[in-house]
Image (cartoon, rainbow, N blue to C red):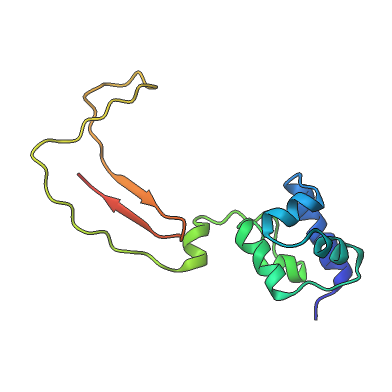
Amino acid sequence: MINSKDFTGRLQKVIDYYSESASSFAEKIGVQRSSISHILSGRNKPSLDFVMKILHTYPEVELYWLMNGKGKFPNQPSTPELSRTNTIETPPKPQPSKQPLNVPNPNSNSDPDSEIDKIVIFYKNGTFKSYKP
């Protein structure tokens, strides 16, 4: 069972880590400001929905650390989006082009004839597609 006093301490640590006020934190995770206030004061216990909103909004917060104090914060997941969704799409095979793609980088002093090696598109749902010209 969750210890409310310890949970509120960890929740306050998350809020402080992101330099948020209780109001701005509530807004970012999509709950009413009073929900944060009641949990921090010990009046209410956090719901599963509340905890999941924190984990979804702040991928550096680890579930077991938030709930039980076991683990570490901030967690540095190598690929937070992929670990949450467990979905990887296989990209379609690109059609071979007649000419290599040459896109100069205006912020770089590198050779303007450099070729693109790979293009990766990341989607908000955690999937991605990779294309090789």
The quarter of the picture where residue 37 lies is bottom right
Name the side, left or right, on which 123 lies relative to 12: left
Residue 107 x, y percent position in the rendering:
39, 22
Using residue 131 as the reference point, say whether residue 61 is left or right of it. right
Q: Is residue 101 above or below residue 13?
A: above
Quadrant of the rendered structure where residue 60 is?
A: bottom right
Question: Which residue corresponds to the image point at 68% horizontal and 58% vertical from the top-left?
Answer: 29
Left or right: where 75 falls relative to 70: left
Task: Give the residue at the far top of this rendering.
Answer: 109
Counting the numbered discs, the total is 0
Residues 27 and 121: in front is 27
- The one of 9 and 26 positioned closer to us in this rendering: 26
Please state, as top left, top right, bottom left or bottom right, where the C terminus lies in the image.
top left
Q: Is residue 112 above or below residue 96?
A: above
Q: Residue furthest left?
A: 98
Q: Nearer the viewer, residue 19 or 22?
A: 22
The outermost residue toward the bottom is 1
> Could you say which is closer to the camera, residue 23 or residue 64?
23
Quadrant housing the N terminus? bottom right
**Residue beneath the point at 71% across and 68% down:** 50
Residue at 32% in and 21% down? 110
Q: Residue at x 8, y 39 (%)?
A: 98
Residue 9 placement (x, y as % from top left): 85, 60
Q: Position of residue 55 (x, y in %)?
A: 64, 63
